[in-house]
Amino acid sequence: MVQSSKLKELSFLVYGVGLSGRSVINFFKKNGIVIIEASSFQLSHSKFICPDYALFLNFSNDHLDWHGSKNNYLNSKLKIFHLQKSKNFAIINENLKKKFIKSKFSGKLLFPKIKDYRKIKKKIKNDYLTSNNNEENMSFVYTLSKLLKISEKSFFKAMKSFKGLSHRFEIFLKRENIKFINDSKATSLKAAEFALRDLKNVYWILGGLPKKNDKLKLRKIKKNITKCYLIGKNINFFKSQIKGKIDFSITKNLKSSIIKISKDIELQKHKNKFILLSPGAASFDQFENFEKRGEEFKRLCKKYVRKFI
């Protein structure tokens, strides 16, 4: 985050630097604030970034094919703190405390507390933000709002109007007691675990191009999964992760998965059901990108929705 002169208004902008082909400098406003979402790829090449407020939420194995190792990946992300001075703030997950201290960064260290956010959670009138999946994200946002001296009235108003991005745990369709969720952005198994953590009676579509050294931890979430449907060109990898732990079918592609789910769902009498695309893998084995995968999933669900009723 880069602050320009004295704060008079807050202008939130979540922006992947360079993704739109425009320089981030175009988004600066006089007496405002720009918020930049910087990837590990961008940070790895960065030489000058020095944010007034740097946030690092969590860390898991990802992009190891590009970075070469987990340590290289972590160090790329940590570059966001390298040039900070004592007047700047470093807001991080407490699990990263030892690494931060060992690196001798100069920023003022803060750890958001989820318990503080939970005290005001009920005042936020936005189902997307108040899901348990977003508690960690929201604890960081709430901590930042306090540092910026944003009033609670303004904070609650902004949170109420917030809309999540497409392909990120996007509840795009509801039919009777069934919810359809597009989480195509979940390109690692850890991300898929987060999506499954707080749902019940889930028909889960899994598969794609797996991340290097990725592993699925089902112990805490397998009770939430009614059945899993494997897609993509790496079926054996995902089969080895779930075989003997949860019920599954090999459906190979999204269309076959959705048709199979529509048949299986008739056999389940639970009140609420979730059809979830949270593939835990990159899309490049079958799609141009995760956006194309998510759009195809939404298109097919809407096409075949009558089969679920």
Image: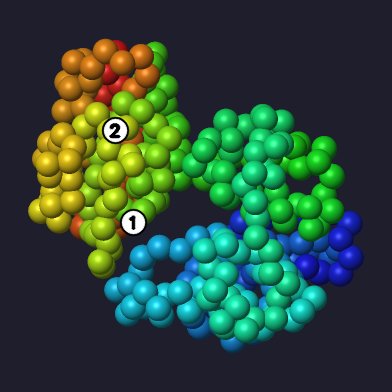
Q: At 46% across and 63% down in the image, what residue appears?
A: 59
From the viewer's perspective, is 59 left or right of 224?
right
Rendered view: 299 above or below 95: above
Which numbered disc, 1 or 2, marks the residue that appears first in the sequence?
1
State the image coordinates of residue 170 (x, y, percent, origin top left): 45, 38
Kindly identify which residue carries mark 2. 223
Residue 171 sits in which quadrant?
top left
Alpha carbon distance from label 1 to label 2: 20 Å
Q: From the image, state whether disc 1 or disc 2 is nearer to you.
A: 2
State the image coordinates of residue 306 (x, y, percent, origin top left): 28, 16
State the image coordinates of residue 256 (x, y, percent, origin top left): 16, 34
Q: How many marks?
A: 2
Kindly identify which residue carries mark 1. 188
Q: At 33% across and 35% down in the image, what residue appears?
A: 276
Rendered view: 63 above or below 160: below
Rendered view: 278 above or below 46: above
Label annotation for residue 163: none
Residue 296 is at least partly visible in this image: no
**Amino acid type of disc 2?**
Lys
Rendered view: 24 above or below 272: below
Q: At 75% across and 37% down in the image, what residue appears?
A: 156
Please tell me which residue lies in front, 23 or 250. Answer: 250
Please tell me which residue lies in front, 25 or 280. Answer: 280
- Which structural element holds mark 2? helix
State the image coordinates of residue 23 (x, y, percent, origin top left): 62, 71
Q: Residues within 10 Å of mark 1 (few under 14, many from 20)?
A: many
